[in-house]
Image (spheres, grey):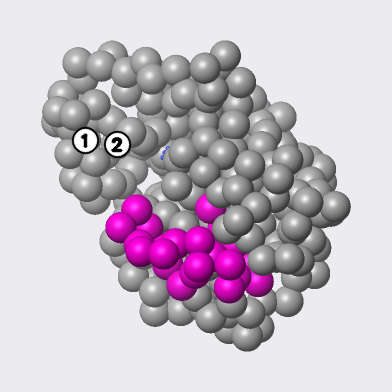
Amino acid sequence: MAQIIDGRALAHKMQAKLADKVAELKAQSRIVPGLAVILVGDNPASQVYVRNKEKFALAAGFKSVTLRLSESTSQEELINIIQEYNNDDSIHGILVQLPLPNHINDKKIILAIDPHKDVDGFHPMNTGHLWSGRPLMVPCTPAGIMEMFREYKIDLEGKQAVIIGRSNIVGKPMAQLLLDKNATVTLTHSRTRHLSEITKQADILIVAIGQGNFVTKDFVKDGAIVIDVGMNRDDNGKLLGDVHFEQVSQVASLITPVPGGVGPMTITMLLEQTYQAALRSVSK
Ligand code: GUN
């Protein structure tokens, strides 16, 4: 039976440390890290994420601004708002919740964010830094997963790491972070043939495909470490990972649960990066 990687406990510990660092920064430099979160429309999942970001930001002593805009907000209006936050010295991190309504081009929105305030690490300048091995702002979900590996003393050197899902938010940045730690990385996706044969080679399997219970025990090698990024709902509205937990926990050595695994770490890294941005603004 696999050991559980407790993301909630690690997030709690890191956020408590962060609250201390925020208090110290306030006392020393009178700077309060400020995070602006922008939500366009009323996607129910996004509303939950945004509410949680606000709750944890406030708990850690941050200034938190949440802007809820109507579905009909134009691209130009959104860019103007981003530019105001770019120029606002009390805001160190800007996050525009994805997905955006169809009439808004998310690439243009990401480009409008000052890369130094891009706490999601989505701006091409930050992806470029990441791929050239000098990361500045890193997408929060893969950054949180790397913290889990650190906490659980998982040595990645020379290991076979397989990622399912090639998104800009998780799969691609995850590949680069694992490469930085000398893992051998395979990036698979919806068109990959003979997927389970590839995933069965994995010492470390990271699943971000967005389909509930997709990875059954037939995909997993005995003793593998399995990280589940999925956040799906079943017919009764119950939260469901991409990994069939009951089955896979029989064969894996370590596994993240859903909820209480990767999710809390994503928010923690968002706060951590906002704090780091605030710190850099002091020495500017
Ligand atoms: N939607 C799902 N995950 C994320 C994320 O990490 N950042 C943003 N901005 N939107 C998301």
How busy is the neighbourhood of tag 2: few (under 14 within 10 Å), some, or many (20 plus)?
many
* Residue 159: image location, x then y, percent: 63, 79
Q: Label 1, on which residue?
A: 79
Q: Secondary structure at mark 2?
A: helix
Does any portion of residue 101 appear in the rendered image? yes
**Residue found at x 45% / y 26%:** 46
Q: Which residue is mark 2?
A: 82
- Say if disc 2 is inside 8 Å of ligand 1: no
Q: Is residue 185 above or below residue 277?
A: below
**Residue extent of the magenta highlight:** 186-207
Q: Is residue 175 magenta?
A: no
Q: Amino acid at mark 2?
A: Ile
Indicate left or right for 102 with 123 as reference. left
Q: Which mark is residue 156?
A: none
Residues at badges 1 and 2 in contact (C-beta under 8 Å)? yes
Mark 1 Cα-neighbour bin, 10 Å: few <14, some 14–19, many ≥20: some
Mark 1 to mark 2: distance in Å?
5 Å
Please tell me in which quarter of the rendered image ligand 1 is found. Answer: top left
Residue 244 pos. (x, y %): 63, 42
Residue at 65% from the left image edge and 71% from the top image edge:
203
Question: In the structure shown, which secondary structural element does the residue marked by tag 1 occupy?
Answer: helix
Task: Relative to 155, say whether 226 is above or below.
Answer: above
Q: Amino acid at mark 1?
A: Ile
Total number of numbered labels? 2
Residue 4: x and y in percent read 80, 49
